Image: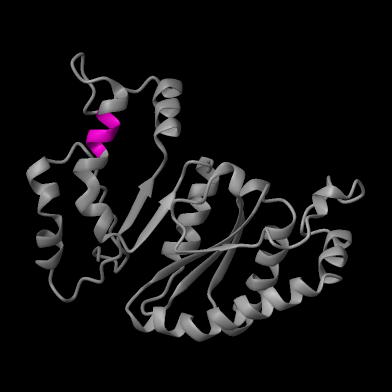
Amino acid sequence: LGRDGAGVAVCIDARNAAADLSRIDEILAALPDTVRLRTLYLDADEDTLLKRFSETRRRHPLASRELPLAEAIRREQALLEPLASEAGLTLDTSEMTIHELRDAVRQRLVGAGAGVLSLLVQSFGFKRGVPADADLVFDVRMLPNPHWSKELRLLTGRDEPVKDFLEAQPLTGELFLELAGFLDRWLPHYASGARSYLTIALGCTGGQHRSVYMAERLFAHLAAHHGPVHLRHRELA
């Protein structure tokens, strides 16, 4: 803690000494018991990192004439692996803007109390890949797809006509009850296992209808029975 009792944030990246990075678990274990440590690891896929460095024209700390950017990024990932494996929370920033990242940190880290399991329910589309920071992934593509209805195609799982369509399908209610029951049964065990963060990802083909609808329903259920819980629709951001 700082002098005023506020938390202190320490940033570690590839510019730190490699020898120190390889000893990160030892260094963290040596901290006094009075320090309540929460570790956040920010990640992104390689294509996104290449694009970011290209757009900002910033030099990667490991890049050189002998080491091209793509290889420098891979070396950085290898150097930071000990830290990544110790992280209590990993955020995949590939699809995030600066403002979304700020909000995610505020929600998941700053606002999380000690001993409380912070939940994130996230919808996504399989055609853009599974979120890298997902802990539990549920595939809801077995539900009838509103995309094939011209009246529903441009809507989302937040819109009443899509909700009505999905709720008219017996499978939808059955799936919700199964998912809610599974989470009700096992979330307390995640919490008792000293875990601070859990990301629950629900995917359909495009991340617009079925996964959004189911994420909204599960979010409401978890907020009423577990909390704190946050909601994000990756493909609607």
At 46% from the left and 22% from the top, the residue drawn is 55
Relative depth, front residue between 21 and 77: 77
Looking at the image, residue 166 sits to the left or right of residue 37; the answer is right
> Is residue 200 depicted above or below 49 in this figure?
below
Horizontal and vertical percent position of residue 203: 61, 56
Horizontal and vertical percent position of residue 154: 83, 45
Residue 204 figure quarter: bottom right
Farthest-out residue, front: 142
Looking at the image, residue 63 sits to the left or right of residue 101; the answer is left
Relative depth, front residue between 101 and 43: 43
Residue 47 figure quarter: top left
> Is residue 137 depicted above or below 100 in this figure?
below
> Is residue 152 depicted above or below 77 in this figure?
below
Farthest-out residue, right: 151
Q: Would you say residue 234 sits in the magenta stretch? A: no
Looking at the image, residue 230 sits to the left or right of residue 46; the answer is right
Horizontal and vertical percent position of residue 56: 42, 23
- Chief SS of the magenta region: helix
Please state the extent of the stretch shown in magenta in the rendering: 72-76
At 39% from the left and 19% from the top, the residue drawn is 57
At 49% from the left and 50% from the top, the residue drawn is 102
Looking at the image, residue 183 sits to the left or right of residue 162; the answer is left
Can residue 49 be seen here? The reply is yes
